Image (spheres, helix red, strand yellow):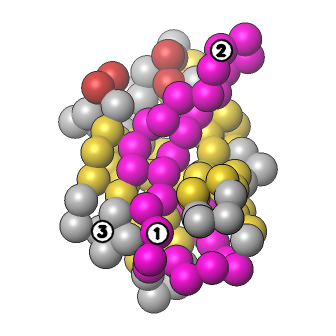
Amino acid sequence: VQLVESGGGLVQAGGSLRLSCRASGFTFSNYVMSWYRQVPGKEREEVALISGDGGVTDYRGSVKGRFIISRDNAVNTVYLQMNSLKAEDTAVYYCHVRTIIANYWGQGTQVTVSS
C-alpha cells in the first residue's frame, strides 16, 4: 500500500488549497479514506472521511462548511479542498486508510496559513 500526498504549501488566511492523495496497492473503491492533521506536540486528529463510493462524508466540527473531501475512484485519488483557511489550520496533513491488515499513512504534506 502506498499513499502519496501533494498540494500543501503556504497560503494567507482566507485563502484556499487543494490536497491530493494518490493511492495504490489496494482496491481503492472498497475503503473509507480519511484526512488527518497534526501539529507539533499534539495528537494527530481526523479532519474528514469519505466512504468508498463517495456517498458519505463526515467532518471535524472546526472545518465543517470550509473543507470538502471528495474522491475519484477512476484514478485512485482522494482530495481535500480547503477554503477560508485559518491560522489554526496550519499542520501537516496526512492521508489514511485502514485495511483489514493494517493502518496506512502517507508521508504528509505541510500546510501553513499565515495570518
The Cα–Cα distance between marks 2 and 1, rounded to whole angstroms, is: 27 Å
* Magenta region: 20-49
Residue beneath the point at 53% across and 29% down: 45
x then y, percent, for residue 19: 54, 53
The Cα–Cα distance between marks 1 and 3, rounded to whole angstroms, is: 10 Å
Question: Is residue 94 inside the magenta stretch?
Answer: no
Q: Is residue 31 above or below residue 92?
A: below
Ranked by sequence position, the earlier of labels 2 and 1 is 1
Q: Secondary structure at mark 3?
A: loop
- Residue labelled with disc 3: 54
x then y, percent, for residue 40: 73, 16
Residue beneath the point at 35% across and 31% down: 60
Residue beneath the point at 37% across and 71% down: 52
State which quadrant residue 86 falls in.
Answer: top left
Question: In the visual, does 101 lie left or right of 85?
Answer: right
Tell me which amino acid carries mark 3.
Answer: Gly
x then y, percent, for residue 57: 27, 53
Tell me which amino acid carries mark 2.
Answer: Lys
Nearer to me, 43 or 79: 43
